[in-house]
Image (spheres, rainbow, N blue to C red):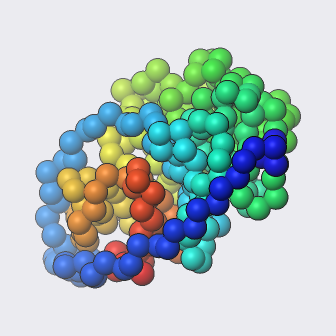
Amino acid sequence: MRRLLPLSLGLLPLVACAPAPAQFPAQSPAQSQPARPAAVAAPADPGFRAAFAPEGVAWVSGGRACVARVPSYRMSCPSLPPAVDVGWNGGDAWAAIPGLGAVITLDRAAQTTQVGRVVALSNTRAYREDGTAVTYAGAAARGVIGAPSAAITGGGGQDYVLLGGKLLRVADGAVLETGAGPYLRATPTGAKSADVPGVTTDFGTYRLANGELQRLDTAGGVVGRVPHGPGRVGLVGGDVVTVSPQGQVRVFGVDLRER
């Protein structure tokens, strides 16, 4: 399908590296900075979503789907009808296009799978408006009852969704959280909800809150910070990567020094 659509691949250079973070306290309990006030909850923008994988970052903002791959992180945004979500599968970045009832790759070899009207993508499947799901190859897969507001493939390879204010594990339908926050975060063992965008790793939690990209220790104390506007954050290999709704991609080391 993507071959039948006009394609424009605008390649924009990655924004130049910003100065290194102003503060890098040691992470021992005695020297860690005290935790800042809790991040203020904000509604997730349904028109802006992102997905991270070892190959890079993909995102959709205002219906426009884009991808930026390692190592250059140059942005590619094919000309497609409005998208609602993005996901990674098999090394490919995919976009869900409800108007076509399909998921379509954003770069590399053109692939299209007819899946119906999809509302959310994980790295393993596409979720339709009624909660039924299919794989990227079009095979039926376990879903949920009702339209998820977000989906993610967490640690261990299982899928999790936000549905009706709850966090559900798709494999068995278990409700893991009630009164869940508007964002999904992958963790090394699964996923959790949160009030602000973030990712939890074996070497710390990273979140976008209070006008900063913050690194938190296991006790929740802020041990590193750099100024940062709204966006999404995730892991791409060993890097912490952020993307803004305007398509600015920034790459940091685990210590928050910008590449």
Q: Position of residue 89 (x, y in %)?
A: 72, 52
- Against 173, residue 233 (above or below) is below
Q: Where's the N terminus, which quadrant? A: top right
Would residue 213 appear left or right of 123 to someone viewing this image? left
Q: Where's the C terminus, which quadrant? A: bottom left
Q: Nearer the viewer, residue 6 or 110?
A: 6
- Against 202, residue 135 (above or below) is above
- Against 106, residue 27 (above or below) is below
Would residue 207 appear left or right of 221 to someone viewing this image? right
Identify which residue is drawn at 28% across, 57% down.
Answer: 229
Identify which residue is drawn at 47% across, 73% down.
Answer: 14
Is residue 174 something one can see in this rendering? no
- Name the quadrant containing residue 248: bottom left
- Name the quadrant containing residue 220: bottom left
Q: Nearer the viewer, residue 241 or 62?
A: 62
Q: Position of residue 20 (x, y in %)?
A: 28, 82
Q: Position of residue 63 (x, y in %)?
A: 53, 38
Identify which residue is drawn at 57% across, 67% down.
Answer: 11
Q: Position of residue 156 (x, y in %)?
A: 64, 53
Would residue 144 appear left or right of 232 to someone viewing this image? right
Is residue 246 something one can see in this rendering? yes
Identify which residue is drawn at 54% across, 44% down.
Answer: 64
